[in-house]
Amino acid sequence: MSDSDKQPKLPEQKSTRVAAIEAAEKLGQFLSNVFGEPIKTSVGMLQDKLAVIRWERQLRLADRVKEITEQRYKEGNSVSVPPRLAVPIIEAASLESDDSLQDLWAHLLASAMNTETAQKVRSAFVDIIKQLEPIDVKILEFC
């Protein structure tokens, strides 16, 4: 047995776990009331709907990136994007419901895929775009 196994649980650790369980039960009851279904069915329906929405947004993203790269760059001028950059871009873009914001993600991904511009794309851009609202995109386009 290690020293950590011998130590008693602290009261705040126990109360945090209890609070988390109570919160999960409360959420489960809420979803059950909203959907009029048992919680397992409700969560499954919600997950299915979210998966479909994300899939549709990812397909739109793929189409936009293809359009942008065809317009901007020569064929055969692409590089792979490191997962630490590609994954957050794709994830954020798939959650974005506004087309103008998703187009911003598509432009960033297209730039990251191009040999001429890939070195200029920084991971900080992901955090910056996450903070933008649709009106911000319109202002940027105007400028």
Image: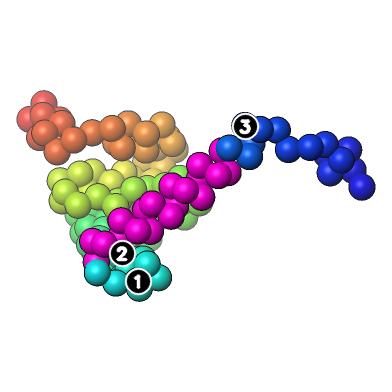
| Magenta span contains residue 120 | no
Find the distance from the CA under tag 2 to the CA under tag 1: 5 Å
Which residue, as the protein is rendered here, is positioned at the far top? Answer: 143
Res. 79 visible in picture:
no
**Residue at point 43% right, 55% down?**
25
Measuring from the top left, give residue 126's x and y in whole percent: 37, 38
- Residue 133 is left or right of residue 111, and the answer is left
- Mark 2, residue position: 32
**Residue at point 56% right, 38% down?**
16
Q: Secondary structure at mark 1?
A: loop
Q: Mark 1 touching mark 3, by CB under 8 A?
A: no
State whether residue 87 is above or below residue 76: above
Q: Mark 2 touching mark 1, by CB under 8 A?
A: yes
Provide the residue span drawn in magenta. 16-35
**Residue at point 87% right, 40% down?**
6
- Mark 1, residue position: 38
Q: Secondary structure at mark 2?
A: helix
- Mark 3, residue position: 12
| Type of the residue with mark 1 | Pro
